[in-house]
Amino acid sequence: MNIWIKKIIDNKIFCLLLTLNILLVVFFLFAPQFAPNSPIEIHADHALLDSSGQYPLGTDQLGRCFLSRLLYGGKSSLLMTIGIVVFISLAGTTVGIMAALAGGAAEQSFMRFLDVVLAIPSMVLVLVMVSIFGNGIVTTTIAIMSVSWITYARISHSLVLEFRESNFIKQAHMGGVRSVRILFKYVLPNVFPHIIVVATQDFGDKLLLLSSLSLLGLGAQPPTPEWGYMLSEGKQFMQRAPWLLFYPGFLIFIHVIMFNLLGDRLQDILDPKET
Amino acid sequence: MLRYFFRRVIALVPVVFIVSVFSFALLYMAPSDPITMKYAKRGEMPPAEVIAQEKAALGLDKGFVQQYSNWLTKALRGDWGSSYDTNQQVAEIMKSKLPNTVLLTFSAVLIMLVFAYPLGILAAVYRNRWIDYAIRLFSFWGTAMPTFWLGLLLMYWMGVRLRLLPVMGSGDFKHLILPATSLAIWLIALYCRRIRSGIVAEINKDYVTGLKARGYSNTRIYLRHIIPNASISILVMLGLSIGDLLGGSMVVEVIFGWQGIGSVALEAVAYRDYVVLQAYVVWMAIIYTFVNLAADMLVCLINPKVRLTEKAV
């Protein structure tokens, strides 16, 4: 494990990207502090104004300060996305490793379960889960979690399969090393770097999924500002106020591209043969 | 080959069966029921006996196995029930909306094939030159670009500013262009990268050197050997991408007002219209599994290695 950490720290571009990413996320978690106006206060007589001193980026259809809404709009999605990625990578990896190490009937039933779940497109499953849990940013997050941990279970299961029968595991078993120790000393260090890469690359996908569900009206509920939902509001006024479309989409795009850059860089470091 | 095909189809039957049980069970356990929803929408609540009576009429008071077998026997005969919300036959909704989604998805794949192959091949042939970097940059941009935002921007520029194409609507070719393009750009970005790396992986293999040594022209080597070989893995990935596309097309359908199955499913979620949702889940699973089966079959036809090992088994 230490080799990996050293490799990562030695890579200057990666450190730079990581810093930028952290700054970006931290900025939008604390951005509401910098909002010049209230994000939900309605001024019907100020609707769809162009930018001005009072409203730096203009106003939306209800006369709410657009900049303030943008600054507020990232917090919940970013927090939820971080929650989703952390939870599904931990839960999925645990299940996958357990299945691979348990073997026998447990592994067989795990595989059959995968067969069935992977036969349904994941977006369809998420939609079913939303219909059960209900609309809202938290329930949508739970719906996404309940479906997407399976990807990690599948990946970590097949990773463990690659070396389950290899000599270093066998020797550890023969040498009388306890199973728990084998898990932490030999199995996890071989799975962990890959999962970290997948999780980093997944961040953008999950942010996109969450904001597209909000855009469809299943995620964040009005009047809470959220970038995806702001896009669907902006769509109706694109002729008069195209800026309502530009900024929220651009902010989502920037986050996705930054995390994709980070993930690709991490993959180059941890898994050089892939590229 | 034929035997392999039949074995694969038979292996799919239990999967589809379990998917149907699974989707039925999920919605069976769902907290809200259609009768209460119906009255809640009207804004009046009748006495509990009336609700119980209506539930009994729909068979909602029976046990799980009973309800499931009722539903399955009807579904197999083509009767998927009628929508709780609009009272329309689900089979009819599917018949009118599903072709639109399939049309949208396959147009996107078609556009992707037309653009991604030339781009991927160009990038691989001129690898590490400026054209390769430009294509990789495009690919990076395209995979990070939210499909829904791209769709909205296309709608704004093409529809509102330049007035070249209709902004919203469904049915004819003009309305298809924008939604299919927004889906396709993401696919092109994804696949030109994959095609590039597939070709680069083939270029350095011994058989290519052998062909060159025997004096075959570069064009012939590419067209007859490298590209077909690289396409095998692309085909498998494409089969898997269809799942993302079928689901992902929902957002594009809703944005552009394209009358596909995705917008139907979204409404079904909003009204907790479980009959429609069940049919949606089962049909998506069937299409998805059969597209993947078709992809595997094509691979089997193209690739002698798979064909022979399958025979040996």
Image (cartoon, coloured by chain):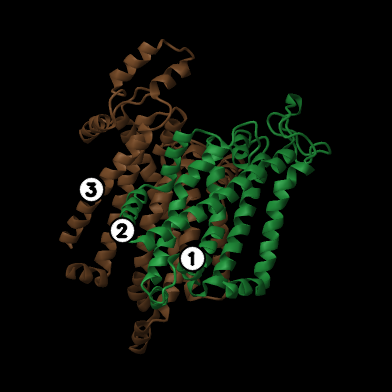
Q: Which mark is residue B193?
A: 1
Q: CA distance from mark 1 to mark 2?
A: 20 Å
- Residue B117 locus on image (x, y percent): 43, 64
The quadrant in which residue B311 appears is bottom left
- Disc marking residue B13: 3
Color used for chain B?
A: brown
Q: Which residue is mark 2?
A: B295
Task: Using residue B87 as the reference point, say whether residue B39 is left or right of it.
Answer: right
Q: How many marks?
A: 3
Residue at screen point 43% across, 66% down = A179
Whether residue B214 appears in this view of the structure is yes
Give me the chain that's green: A
Crowding at dot 2, Cα within 10 Å, few <14 / some 14-19 / many 20+, comes out as many
Spot occupied by residue B68 in the image (x, y as percentages of width and height): 27, 33
Same chain shared by disc 1 and disc 2:
yes
Q: In the image, what residue type sits under mark 1?
A: Arg
The answer to which of marks 1 and 3 sits earlier in the sequence is 3
Q: Secondary structure at mark 3?
A: helix
Q: Camera-side residue: B219 or A61?
A: A61
Nearer the observer, B137 or A170: A170
